[in-house]
Image (tube, helix red, strand yellow):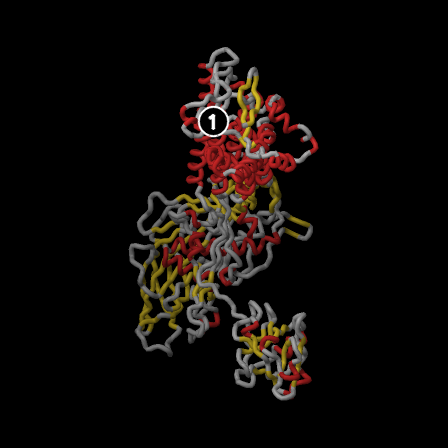
Amino acid sequence: MARNVSFQCPSGGDWYVCLYGTKFAGCCSVDPCLETCPQDSLFPIAFDPDDFRTIPDASCGASSNFYSCTANNTFLGCCRSNACVSGCPKGDLGPASLEQPSQRRIWGSVSGNTSSSPPVQRAPVARISSAPAEITYTSSGEKLGRIDGLAAISVAAGIMIAMSISVALWLWFRGMRATDHKHERVSESEPQPTQATASGKDSSQTESVSDHPVSGLRDLNRLGSRSLSTLGATIFVELCVCGFLAFLWYGHANNQTWNKIMVYGWATRSIAVAALVLRTAVDLQAALGSAILASLLLESGFGVQLHQVAGLSSMRAGGTSPWSFAWYAMEGLWRSVSHGRRFRGLYLVGGCLLLTSSLLQFASTLLLSDLRTGPLVADVSMSQVRPDLSYLATVSGNTQGIPRGSAWTTNPPSYPVFGEYHEPIRNREDGVADTGLLLRAFLPYKLADDRQRLSSYSGNALVMDARVSCQAPTVTQVQASAFDLSKSRSKIIRQAQISGLVSPTKNSTMLQSISTTPFNCTLTGSTTTVCQLALSRDASTGSLKSQFPDTTSFGTAYLVLKSDSKFAASRPWANFSAEQDGRTVNASASLCFAPWNSAVLNVELSSKENRTEPLLRYVIEDFTTYGSGTYQTQDILNHLIPSANTSTRQLLAMEKPRSYLGDLPPLYRRPVIQSDISPSFVGQTNNPLPGNWSAIMSGTSLVTTLRNFEIAPIQYVAADPAVAAIFNDALNATSIEWALSSVITILSMTNYYGQQPAFDRVDNVTTAFFEDVLYPRDHLGLTLLMWALTAHFIVVAILVVLFVKKTRLTLLGNAWSAFAQLAESREVMELMAGASVKSDAEVLDELKEARKDGLRARVVWQGEGVEVVVK
């Protein structure tokens, strides 16, 4: 046994021993069990010197050592300096931890709550304050809704298509108006002096395209077949990629192609490939746009700096990028701010081209940001299931179930998903409460995850008839035996054994011929009692007709009793009373019938979304009083009882069976789902359920309930508190028939899944399950991409229009033309002498030495051809 060691915190803080988490031990002013104690909250430990040899060293960090000091004031703990000489300065203290079991046995043995022996304080335990959230796959992280995103990308796509068609039509109309001549008369290549220049105005204000009439080339010829083909092909590819992305983002699971892409994990691959194709098309357009910008600069009236002419001229061949143009633009602006202002329009367009083409390089990042994990239906497949016992004869005998006790007194382990087909009663009979046709199919899967992910199920499954019909009974010859004669002087008996005869008042639809039945049931104050009825051991009271023809099982009949006569006569309740020794018993009763049988039917189950099986929570209202908690059954009731809001029900829809002729248990076997209130085993010999057994819906244990009786009742069980809570809440929220049907369903599920290990019948079924996959569930990334691409389209369209209108001498995308215009220039040829082995920087230095770095060059018509002139 571990010794109780005394630790103190004389300098401050509280004593903590964290047996889990950080495993901290020591004095700290904050809780150190989730995160270790901060340096400024750490205090030294003192201890009883008599315990010096019994305290094992704790573990310290790499920068400190553990010290146990008994001289002067005792010290215990981790310190970066020698704490036994003059104590440990606060800045040298380190946290101690308990890594070994031997450490925890001694350090964690402190008890009591005195100054000499403070109590051990452990990390707090969090307590939920509301019902746990269901696991549903919704667009909880959606930044842009589906409808808003669709509208945004539709507008963007419309602008791109309209822009492309408009530019194409504009070029076509210009070509129609052009003459068949290859050249036209244009102004002379060199500008003539004008009054404007003589007065000191800048020559760049004159016509920038050409200064003398020459023969120009037609628009389409100057654009070039390669450039036009590139432009047309990239536009087509970009629009196709946009359409494909729209298909990925707005496709539906009903589309097999879309579903296969997502389920097989091809969403990320498809997006990556689409983004690569899109980036390639954008790069080609950006190169074409850069070539146009270079052409506009070279043919402008102001020209470019002389040392830049070689680079910009070669850019017109198309093998460039916006970054290359940006370099030349920044260099020119840096060397001559006043001259650069003349091209601010071109620089602005070039900056937009650089921005859009750069943003579109992150297409994959934008698109992948819209992916979220969510459920989609995988492929339909064949599988084998075990839905029931085979009841086949074997060498050792017939198939039998597992001997288990009554489900009435068993805590339901879960509330599984099931398939349901329901037909409400159209013409209700007065005084009769009927659920209508109610079939529930149990899923032959042991794991809750399989049941929750099931999307469709086609094949054999065990189906129970969960219909219940209740009515006000006729109760006669009532006698009462009170259980509280010596404890109560009241003239009203609230706890008694009630006996008499009961019979139905209505011969309702589907009701068999019911015999008047004797009953002997327990009445327990304000608690509801469900009393099982039978004529005798071998004779049934009768029940509802089963939906399954030729059923071999006996139905069930229950008399539901309550000592308070609070139910209105219009409901399926009858009020009656009895007297004993001048004392009166007042009670309400409802007579209910249920076929409670099952058959293996061929069913079709389906669900549009996966689901989460509901949980039953127990909330403690007063922690100082034992048993003061209550069950929160709302989720269970939503699961079991049909309502207008079907979205909260965690089940699969079952189509109406094509035939109710199914495989039934043999005549000698009780249905495996049927549960007896008496302690008989599940699945025993097929006899009527024994009569006069009462299940008390008090929500307490049998022992606790018996304390209310002076004389013990007979043939009596206390229903499990969870079962009782569901029944009582359903009774208060709805009606008796749905309360009893809900309990019968829960008991059937408890029996079914409890017997599942013994199931040996094998059937082939066709199923599909929801799989958690990555697929587009947000739309912000796609929308941003579409608008960035739209802006890129607009910039490229502007550049094409500017090229056609502002240039006359450039053959876009032609390298020889660009080279010849340089080679035929005498001024440029002088610069080229010896430049083949010189860097651009060396050429610029030579220009500076020759005082020619301020010269500018532009492309003009010179003589019979086009060349670069320098001024």
Q: Is residue 531 above or below residue 352?
A: below
The residue furthest left is 569
Q: Quadrant of the C terminus?
A: top right
For the residue pair 669 and 39, the one nearer the viewer reads as 39
Nearer to the camera, 664 or 639: 639
Which of the pair 453/422 is nearer the observer?
453
Is residue 447 visible in this depiction of the protein? yes
Residue 648, x across and y down, in percent: 43, 50
Decide: few, some or many residues near mark 1? Use Cα within 10 Å; few <14, some 14-19, many ≥20.
some
The furthest residue to the right: 837
Residue at screen point 31% across, 70% down: 584
Label 1 sits on a secondary structure element that is helix
**Which quadrant of the figure has residue 277?**
top right
Q: Is residue 61 above or below residue 799?
A: below
Residue at 60%, 45% (x, y): give it. Answer: 385
Q: How many marks?
A: 1
- Amino acid type, mark 1: Leu
Residue at x 46% of width, y 46% of height: 143
Q: Residue 25 at x, y = what percent?
A: 60, 75
Q: Is residue 1 left or right of residue 173?
A: right
Camera-nearest residue between 672 and 460: 460
Q: Is residue 814 visible?
A: no
Image x and y of residue 443, in percent: 54, 48
* Residue indicated by mark 1: 802
The image quadrant where one finds the N terminus is bottom right
